[in-house]
Image (cartoon, helix red, strand yellow):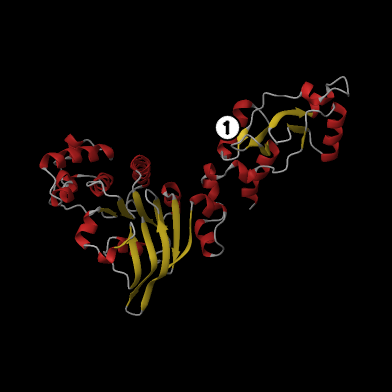
């Protein structure tokens, strides 16, 4: 959808962007983040030619934007900035309908679209259409700015620190609304911020920049779990992943080699396996590693006959968890079912690991020790 190919930008003798290369897929929300002066806003503004690159190419749908009509390009890209950019002498309706009017939409279509957009950003059209920006709160103005960016249903939306001047409650509300809108409409959104929590909350992928270079461009999960050494690691914070526990997957914390056996073992054999491996339970699997049951030392000791088979006494109604679920799901399931262990299965229901209460306590406590 959007591609930067060896793009650089210089002002006199100062290099602001140093030959960057990256691609943004259609329908993806990508966050550009980094310290002040890193080049994130310059990168954003080059997409709609508010700033022209000194070298390299920027492609949209495979077409070099340097060869495209600048006015038409901008009219087909929504743009939201920190100061809203609303025209103070225009009403809310006139601000939202400006680009559709320039594109020669009918009056009826503009009014219909304006009402739709007002509803989309959580504002009643009848109450606000005829008001002027100065009559609105900062949060309301920014909602109108977002609505205006979506006015002509563009494929690309650029958002340059749109919520940074707002109070935390309003900012959080607008982040939630943008996320909900994106889930529904799947626009290609490029979002600039200096707030890592905002980036993690909104981004499908995050592009971390410093001194005009891209240091890491990846999903929030991968950046949190495997940050590039040095600046990125310091920038995101060592234990920031614990602020987003839903990103910590079962596969990240499970015991990967739980002790298993097959259902044909006798009680005596099973007890000996437990003693040797220093465990108090066994997971029972078949030759394809499909989970068949679980047996505990307590259950085995109740077996009056040492020649009794495991299949005769194992628990077959197993509570388990999938490897792509989160640590939040583990805690919920353990709390709701009062179990101290959860076998971990993949999408094919094959055994991949085990999460025990002691393992969970160890993982959770490590964040405080660190």
Q: Between residue 12 and residue 308, name the one nearer to us.
A: 308
Mark 1 crowd level (few <14, some 14–19, many ≥20, 10 Å Cα): few
Q: Percent position (x, y) of residue 40?
A: 38, 62
Q: Percent position (x, y) of residue 55?
A: 34, 73
- Is any atom of residue 212 visible in this view? no
In the image, is 312 to the left or to the right of 114?
Answer: right
Image point (36%, 77%), residue name: 14
Image height of 292 relative to 242, above or below? above
Image point (35%, 39%), residue name: 184
Q: Percent position (x, y) of residue 136?
A: 21, 44
In the image, is 222 to the left or to the right of 47?
Answer: right
Asked which quadrant contains residue 214, the reply is: bottom left
- Is any atom of residue 3 visible in this view? yes
Instruction: Name the residue carrying label 1.
Output: 332
Image height of 53 relative to 364, above or below? below
Q: Between residue 105 and residue 159, name the one nearer to us.
A: 105
Q: Percent position (x, y) of residue 342?
A: 66, 33
In the image, farthest residue toward the top: 304
Asked which quadrant contains residue 301, the reply is: top right
Q: How many marks?
A: 1
In the image, farthest residue toward the bottom: 13
Secondary structure of residue under mark 1: helix
Q: Where, quadrant-wise, is the N terminus in this rendering?
A: bottom left
Q: Between residue 334 and residue 15, name the one nearer to us.
A: 15
Asked which quadrant contains residue 320, the reply is: top right
Image height of 298 relative to 40, above or below? above
């Amino acid at each position: 959808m959007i591609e930067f190919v060896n793009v650089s930008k210089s002002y006199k003798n100062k290099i602001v962007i140093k030959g960057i290369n990256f691609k943004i897929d259609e329908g993806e929300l990508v966050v550009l983040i980094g310290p002040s002066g890193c080049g994130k806003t310059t990168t954003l503004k080059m997409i709609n030619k508010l700033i022209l690159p000194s070298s390299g190419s920027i492609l949209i749908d495979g077409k070099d934007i340097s060869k495209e009509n600048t006015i038409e390009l901008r009219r087909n890209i929504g743009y939201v900035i920190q100061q809203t950019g609303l025209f103070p002498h225009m009403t809310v309706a006139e601000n939202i309908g400006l680009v559709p009017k320039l594109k020669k939409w009918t009056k009826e279509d503009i009014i219909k679209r304006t009402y739709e957009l007002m509803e989309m950003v959580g504002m009643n059209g009848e109450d606000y259409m005829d008001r002027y920006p100065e009559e609105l709160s900062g949060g309301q103005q920014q909602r109108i700015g977002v609505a205006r960016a979506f006015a002509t249903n563009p494929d690309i939306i650029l958002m340059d620190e749109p919520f940074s001047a707002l109070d935390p409650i309003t900012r959080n509300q607008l982040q939630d609304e943008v996320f909900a809108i994106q889930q529904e409409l799947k626009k290609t959104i490029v979002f600039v911020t200096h707030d890592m929590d905002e980036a993690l909350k909104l981004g499908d992928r995050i592009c971390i920049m410093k001194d005009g270079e891209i240091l890491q461009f990846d999903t929030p999960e991968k950046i949190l779990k495997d940050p590039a050494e040095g600046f990125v690691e310091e920038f995101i914070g060592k234990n920031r992943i614990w602020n987003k526990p839903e990103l910590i997957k079962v596969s990240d914390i499970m015991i990967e080699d739980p002790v298993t056996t097959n259902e044909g073992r006798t009680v005596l054999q099973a007890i000996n396996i437990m003693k040797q491996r220093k465990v108090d339970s066994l997971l029972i699997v078949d030759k394809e590693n499909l989970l068949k049951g679980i047996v505990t030392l307590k259950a085995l000791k109740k077996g009056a006959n040492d020649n009794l088979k495991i299949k005769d006494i194992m628990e077959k109604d197993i509570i388990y968890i999938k490897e792509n679920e989160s640590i939040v799901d583990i805690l919920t399931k353990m709390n709701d079912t009062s179990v101290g262990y959860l076998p971990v299965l993949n999408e094919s229901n094959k055994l991949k690991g085990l999460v025990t209460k002691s393992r969970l306590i160890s993982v959770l406590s490590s964040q405080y020790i660190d």
